[in-house]
Image: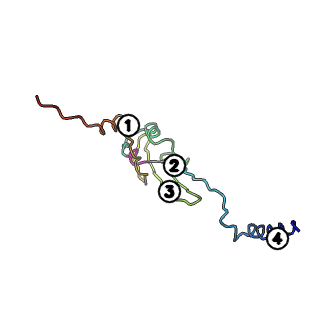
Amino acid sequence: MMKAKVLILLLPIALATSACSVANFLTPYKLDIPQGNEITADQVAKLKTGMTHSQVRFLLGTPLLTDPFHANRWDYLYSDARAGVLRDKKSYVLIFEGDSLVSFSGETLPAPAKFQSAETSVASAVTPAPAAKE
């Protein structure tokens, strides 16, 4: 008798959770995946025409794509997917002539917010007392 009650309770639960349309809320976790080079506005502000390959690589990092057919073109790509949905996709292109940078263009990420050091935040919070008149 006890086995029959348990079976009657477990059978609808098993059928409901095995049905795809009913158990649609049970989706697997999807990772947040930023890929590529994050080129920010402050990095681009430091770029100047005439820079060498090594100077650009030091400033921006190694490009994601180096085309063997266009050795003078560097492509920096960035994509950000959150929960399986592409949120952001940016590309930045640099053109070289020989070993010097000729042109650069593309989309950048905003410059990161600057953090104040502990000393400057404490110094700005504490105001000096006015000098006493003698």
Closer to the chain start, of discs 3 and 4, is 4
Residue at the disc numbered 4: 8
SS class, disc 3: strand
Residue bounds of the magenta highlight: 40-44
Residue type at the position of mark 1: Ser
Disc 2 to disc 3, C-alpha distance:
23 Å
Nearest to viewer (mark 1 / mark 3): 1
Nearest to viewer (mark 4 / mark 1): 4
Please give the name of the residue rendered at 39% of the width and 42% of the height, measured from the top-left corner.
115
SS class, disc 1: loop
Residue at the disc numbered 3: 89
Residue type at the position of mark 3: Lys
**Up-down: is 85 above or below 121?**
below
Residue type at the position of mark 4: Ile
For this rendering, which residue is in front, 40 or 28?
28
Residue at the disc numbered 2: 70
